[in-house]
Image (tube, rainbow, N blue to C red):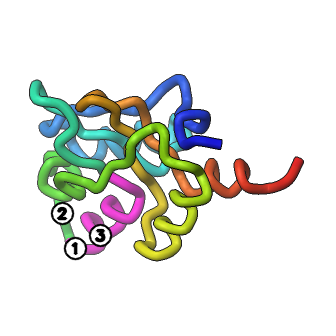
């Protein structure tokens, strides 16, 4: 199975000026652990639940733009990489969320739970 099969229909996307309060609210309302941060050029970062925890623990004001606490220029993966390779990479790097990009276009974000479910025999 290729990672393309795990990309969901919707990906939460915010602009770099979105406040961390708005990002946190979106993450809770939509039960997601990561959002893509995009500008007119495309994907510029990813903001994960870990990034949010670091921001709050670091005393960031809730009106802080997400661009100040996101992971900039995140590693990305192409859609045709086998799921088992992604699982290994996630274990080696500690990543729990991974943007999937094809020809510069964001297709979605997969998380470690998606990958694990794909590997469990049915």
115 w.r.t. 16: above or below = below
Classify mark 1: residues with Cα within 10 Å, few (<14), some (14-19) or many (20+): few
Quick one: 28 or 85, which is closer to the camera? 85
Q: Which mark is residue 58?
A: 1
Quick one: 51 or 113, which is closer to the camera? 113
Circles 1 and 3: CB atoms closer than 8 Å: yes
The residue identified by callout 2 is 60
For residue 73, side relative to residue 88 (left or right): left
25 w.r.t. 55: above or below = above
The residue identified by callout 3 is 54
Is 48 part of what is drawn in magenta? yes
Determine the residue positioned at 71% across, 48% down: 118
Residue stretch rendered in magenta on the structure: 47-58
Using the numbered discs, state the Cα–Cα distance from disc 2 to disc 1 in whole angstroms: 6 Å
Quick one: 17 or 108, which is closer to the camera? 108
Determine the residue positioned at 53% across, 35% down: 4
Sequence-wise, which precedes: disc 3 or disc 2? 3
């Amino acid at each position: 199975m290729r990672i393309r099969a795990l990309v969901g229909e919707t990906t939460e996307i915010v602009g770099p000026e979105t406040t961390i309060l708005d990002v946190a609210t979106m993450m809770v309302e939509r039960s997601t652990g990561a959002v893509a941060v995009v500008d007119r050029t495309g994907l510029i970062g990813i903001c994960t639940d870990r990034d949010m925890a670091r921001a709050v623990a670091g005393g960031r004001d809730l009106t802080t733009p997400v661009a100040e606490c996101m992971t900039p220029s995140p590693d990305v993966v192409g859609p045709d990489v086998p799921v088992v390779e992604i699982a290994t990479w996630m274990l080696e790097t500690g990543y729990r969320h991974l943007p999937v990009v094809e020809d510069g276009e964001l297709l979605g974000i997969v998380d470690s739970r998606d990958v694990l479910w794909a590997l469990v025999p049915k």
